[in-house]
Image: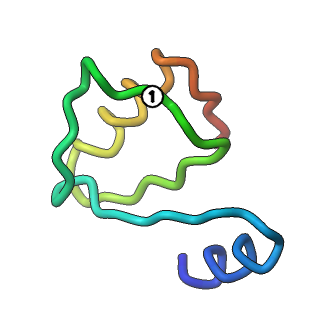
Amino acid sequence: MLNVTEILTRRGFRVESGIPEEMLACPDRLAPTHDLYLLKSYTALSPNLAGVLHVGGAARKA
């Protein structure tokens, strides 16, 4: 993931990273604010977070 972050930053994108299990987020207040989300997790949290973002209007690419 580091290489992707470096490439996107060099191309002028603002990149933020975080681990969903360590972040505090209220699903009812979560709204997509970025063009791209890369979610990685070893639990069911990331797919659930992706679902909340998708319902909120984020486009999903696999």
**Looking at the image, which is closer to me, 30 or 52?**
30
Rate crowding at label 1 as few (under 14), some (14 to 19) or many (20 or more) other CA atoms within 10 Å.
some
User: Can you say whether 27 is above or below 61 in the image?
Assistant: above
Residue that lies at the very extreme toward the right in this rendered image: 11
Give the number of marks: 1
Residue 42 against residue 44 in the figure, above or below: below
Q: Where the C terminus falls, by quadrant? A: top right
Q: Split into 4 quadrants, where in the image is the N terminus? A: bottom right
Q: Nearer the viewer, residue 16 or 20?
A: 16
Where residue 34 sits, quadrant-wise, is top right
* Nearer to me, 55 or 35: 35
Q: Position of residue 11 (x, y in %)?
A: 83, 72
Q: Where is residue 5, by image quadrant?
A: bottom right
On screen, residue 53 above or below 10: above
| Left or right: 10 in relation to 17 | right
Q: Report the side of 26 relative to 2 (left or right).
A: left
Q: Residue 20 at what x, y percent from top left?
A: 26, 53
Residue lying at 33% horizontally and 36% vertically, measured from the top left:
49
Query: Residue 48: x, y in percent?
Result: 30, 32
Q: What residue is pinned by disc 1? A: 53
Q: Is residue 37 left or right of residue 25?
A: right
Residue at 16% of width from left, 60% of height from top?
22
Residue located at (19% from left, 30% from top): 26
Circle 1: residue type: Leu
Q: In the image, is 32 to the left or to the right of 22?
A: right
Residue at image coords 78%, 80% = 10
Q: Secondary structure at mark 1?
A: helix
Q: How is the image coloured?
A: rainbow
What percent of the width, then of the height, locates residue 52? 37, 24
